[in-house]
Image: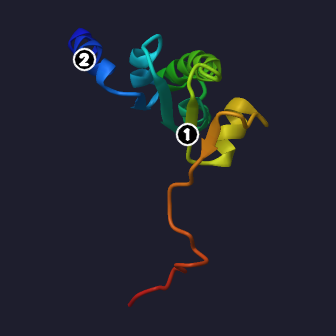
């Protein structure tokens, strides 16, 4: 979006750091001054691979998700090292994309600690 990029270029000099939520927004901050954090939430390509497994084998949905999953996986893996920090919500997503790399990846779980807040069924 040209309007978004123009606004970013106008204000980015006022800040030391950018925090981009999701990979598509992160592209706007690359090659700009300052530190850049990418909050990926999860590996979208992993979600796509799960969806394509559930879809009928030769369905349009399966074909589209297969193509997109491969392209997105390659792209998601390429972001490693391009950001000061990458955040994901699970170790599963981290390992899927980056294996055992740890130097600029933070796993920040999204949810409730069930040991401190156990589930109790209510009537």
Q: Nearer the viewer, residue 44 or 31?
A: 31
CA gap, disc 2 to disc 1? 23 Å
Q: Residue 91 at x, y = what percent?
A: 68, 47
Marker disc for residue 4: 2
x, y percent for residue 81: 64, 21
| Secondary structure beneath label 1 | strand
Report which residue position mark 1 lands on: 87
Q: Position of residue 67 (x, y in %)?
A: 56, 16
Question: Quarter holding the N terminus?
Answer: top left
Location of the C terminus by quadrant is bottom left
Q: Residue at x 20, y 13 (%)?
A: 3
Crowding near the residue tagged with mark 1, few <14, some 14–19, many ≥20 C-alpha atoms within 10 Å: many
Q: Position of residue 79 (x, y in %)?
A: 59, 20
Residue at x 61% of width, y 32% of height:
49
Q: How is the image coloured?
A: rainbow
- Relative to 94, does residue 76 appear above or below in the rendering? above
Q: Mark number for residue 116?
A: none
| Residue positioned most to the bottom | 123
**Vertical position of residue 102 compared to residue 113: above or below:** above
**What residue lies at 32% left-to-right and 18% top-to-bottom?**
13
Q: Is residue 111 left or right of residue 95?
A: left
Residue 63 falls left or right of residue 32: right
Whether residue 55 can be seen here = no
């Amino acid at each position: 979006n040209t309007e978004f990029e123009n606004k970013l270029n106008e204000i980015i000099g006022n800040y030391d750091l950018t925090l981009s939520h999701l990979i598509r927004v992160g592209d706007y901050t690359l090659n700009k001054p300052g530190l850049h954090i990418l909050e990926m939430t999860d590996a979208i390509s992993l979600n796509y691979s799960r969806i394509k497994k559930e879809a009928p084998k030769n369905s349009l949905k399966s074909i589209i998700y297969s193509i997109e999953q491969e392209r997105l996986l390659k792209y998601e893996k390429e972001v490693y090292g391009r950001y000061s920090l990458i955040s994901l919500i699970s170790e599963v997503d981290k390992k899927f994309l980056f294996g055992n790399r740890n130097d600029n990846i933070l796993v920040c779980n999204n949810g409730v600690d069930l040991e401190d807040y156990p589930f109790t069924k209510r009537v």
